Image (spheres, coloured by chain):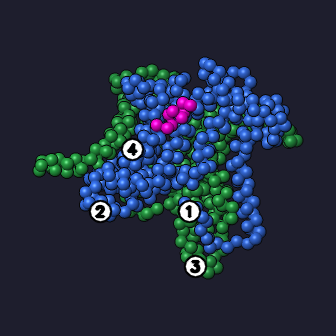
Chain colours: A blue, B green
Amino acid sequence: MAANPIETAVRTGRLTRALIYAALLVFAVYYLLPLFVMMVNSFKELDEIRGGNMLALPELVTLAPWIKAWNQAQIGVQPTGLAPYFLNSIKMVVPAVVISTLLGALNGYVLTKWRFRGDTLVFALMLFACFIPFQIVLIPMARVLGFLGIAGTTWGLVLVHVVYGLGFTTLFFRNYYAAFPTELVKAAQIDGASFLRIFYRILLPSSGPIIVVTVIWQFTNIWNDFLFGASFSDFDSQPMTVALNNLVSSSTGVKEYNVHFAGAILAAIPTLLVYIVAGRYFVRGLMAGAVKG
Amino acid sequence: MEYGRYLRGWAQQALPRLVLAPSFATIVLFVYGFIVFTAYLSFTNSRILPKFNLIGFENYEKLFGLRHWSTAIENLVIFGGLYIAICTAIGLTLAILLDQKIRAEGVLRPLYLYPMALSFIVTGTAWKWFLDPGIGLEQTLQSWGWASFEFDWIKNRQMAIYTIVIAAVWQTSGFVMAIFLAGLRGIDNEIIKAAQIDGASNLRLYARIIIPQLRPAFLSAFVVLAHMAIKSYDLVVALTGGGPGRATEMPATFMYSYTFTRNQMGIGAGSAVIMLMMIAAVIVPYLYAELREPRHGR
């Protein structure tokens, strides 16, 4: 998507423009409202939430819900808060992103610059894997993880996320490298450069943008994953999303909405930060998944 | 010497395929092998653990006789239909409005899209509270003086599915906007100018010339939304947990509960196969067309 608005030829009057701006602002409020509500109420005492207006700023700002969500709330057996689960997510996300991105880059390189008979079929099979409903793999995956001895561990989750991320990472790099001049690769081959050397020296140095796109895409997806986390983790390897859901839906006692909101924002901070810093690349990933070309 | 060169040549020839092989083998095993395994299980009487004796179509007969499953399918139709229609309408409207040389576009567009970066579990937390009659929107409007205002859909068996539509539309409509905006930016301005010279009004211009040219964007949006609708799981779990009762059951939550909590693995596997077939019906023709067409640089 173009970063700058391209001139459109449609002409509009002044009143129409005012209405357009008004409509756009209303939508902006609509999208921001849930985040705003969570933010504002995470700093309120529970009494104030129950008694009052959900849009009002806190009368008395308190950090207690945040502290409770981070390291005191009862989620598993111990009142540990979300902190250990946050760490679990990081331990899962970092290796999964690195491995799947690296493999995707190599796959994309082979599929565009070292084409062979049947490569389109290979790619199509990998691409379809991006879209399968993961329910279809849950049962055998549980068995395979048990067989490999990594059931319920962070490494098990890393494996799962690498496997089911490969289709997308390969897609990203393949489409990017398809536009890379093949003549350069051919010339380097004639000069005697090897397969890996061409990759390191010629393609990789110009792959910056697509690496960013892929890393952000994988990071966001894996961090936000719930199904695999809920299916394949134990108490000591649960990722953040699963812990947050346990915190929010635990039905014992009063619903501490302020703590839930603080916890939800804690779970959102990493992906939200990435979006704020590099949202453009995130959108490119989204679009590449939607409209290939 | 001669042999060594031959060997090195062969290695160079085979290396690309050797590099691709582990990934491809992994996909073949973990995706296609697993699909075959699950499909096989759907023809067995597996309960807690997989069993391998075939029993024919019994699970599928049972599945389609189950009230939970028909609820799940009905909900998918209601949810999917509304979700796709509303997201498309909002997405297209926003894209057209943003395409009018809006000065603040660079600020607005990211605001519309940020929900896509969040987990459904996170946003579900906000929506759950917002929709909770005792404390959220209902309570707020009542405290503002609208005493008769009632909004208890999330607790209502008939209406709960619509609360999931509300939250899901909020989450993805900005993304659909981005798809349409990209489509709008790809339209040749010369055609628009020519129509304007012919005296076409703005409304006519959009209805007759611009929107019809967005067909690929409509198709992309449909495929993305339909496949997300079929897969919906996180949001249902976060928002209603499938309740009240099992009123917001969807195929994905059905599969999970039958396989892992009700110990009806054969039926659970059958429901997963149906889900895969629904997705394939949407995705395969699309991928086929995409891969066949000569691609243009992006």
Task: State the quadrant of the C terminus of chain A.
Answer: bottom left
Residue at x 57% of width, y 54% of height: A280
Which residue has dot 3 on it?
Answer: B194
> Observer-nearest residue: A273 or B123?
A273
* Mark 4 Cα-neighbour bin, 10 Å: few <14, some 14–19, many ≥20: many
Query: For the residues marked 2 and 3, what is the alpha-carbon distance in whole angstroms?
Result: 46 Å
* Mark 2 Cα-neighbour bin, 10 Å: few <14, some 14–19, many ≥20: few
Extreme-right residue of the structure = B145
How many numbered discs? 4
First to last magenta residue range: A87-95
Is residue A94 shown above or below B262?
below
Query: For the residues marked 1 and 4, what is the alpha-carbon distance in whole angstroms?
Result: 29 Å
SS under mark 3:
helix
Which residue has dot 1 on it?
Answer: A2
Which residue has dot 4 on it?
Answer: A103
Residue A44 falls within the magenta-colored stretch: no
